[in-house]
Amino acid sequence: MRDTLKVGVVGVGYLGRFHALIYSRLAGVELVGVADVDAERAAAVAAEAGCEAFADPSALLGRVDAVSIVVPTSLHLPVARPYLEQGVHMLLEKPVAPDLDAGREIVRLAEASGATLQIGHLERFNAGIAALAGRIESPRFIEAQRMGGFTERATDVDVVSDLMIHDIDIILALVDADLADVRAVGSPVLTEHVDIANARLEFVNGTVANVVASRVSDKTTRRIRVFQPRGYLSLDFVEQTLDIATPVPQPDAARPQIHRERIQVEPVKPLDREIAAFVDCVRHHRRPLVHGAVGLQALEVALQVRERIGA
């Protein structure tokens, strides 16, 4: 591969614009262009990022080594296919696809051509999650809440695919066991899709996770709590604080004393870290942290949640 990595971004709506701006600042990376069916939007982002603008999503073919695909989930396979068939390395926004067949085909295409495929589960690059994961031993109960106010963004999908899938992916990474059962309830509130949902994930080793996601709440809450035999951990994504409670045996007492600690996590920009990790994987031929199979696993569980809800 040449010294300068040539990249492009397909889809420069709210999130895709940030992809373009981050690439434009990275050393050793040349942002060749951005593509969007909204030609005016593409031109505006291109002017901001200092690159060319295209209206055709396939216009970057043959001009880039790697690409970010940030289009609606329903378009992932048709937009990604020509790039993957030509071995273009890809950062594909989550979820990997709208259904398992399309997701499996995306992964197959990447494997067949040797293209690096990273799925954009952004929270894996949250500094708080890294701090939490490093302290996990054998979780028994996990509670995750991801709730916020309504916005028009991503209303083409339900809250499970939009928000809950983040915590599903995190929980699957924290629990070293197969999933045994999924139960879920949910309801539309402001859209035709499910806007609030609760899922209970039961694993074969006895671990249970309770996951709540809402995009119709007054207060923004993003928190995950983990209970394990030798302690309790609670991460606040918004405040980037990790609270830890650990029982400490006392020689002259019948019960342990609870030692409490609060860690203020050094904040980082997860999208910057995610894109930098993708570039590093491409340069050094490394398997991404969130590779295609990981994205498929999260999608499969999210689809099970939707099926239980009846969505």
Image (cartoon, rainbow, N blue to C red):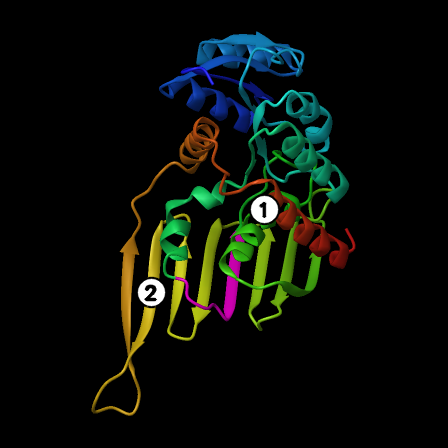
In this view, 132 is above or below 142: above
Residue at the spot 63% in from the left edge and 40% down from the top edge = 95
25 left or right of 113 in image: left
In this view, 143 is above or below 5: below
- Looking at the image, tell me whether mark 1 or mark 2 is earlier in sequence order: 2
Question: Is residue 293 highlighted in magenta?
Answer: no
Q: What stretch is highlighted in magenta?
A: 136-146
Residue 73 position, x and y percent, is: 68, 34
Q: Residue furthest left?
A: 252
Residue 109 position, x and y percent, is: 68, 31
Residue 186 position, x and y percent, is: 70, 56
Residue matched to label 2:
244
271 left or right of 110 in image: left
Q: Which of these two is toward me, 301 or 279?
A: 279
The amino acid type of the residue labelled 2 equals: Ile
User: What kind of element bears circle 1?
Assistant: helix
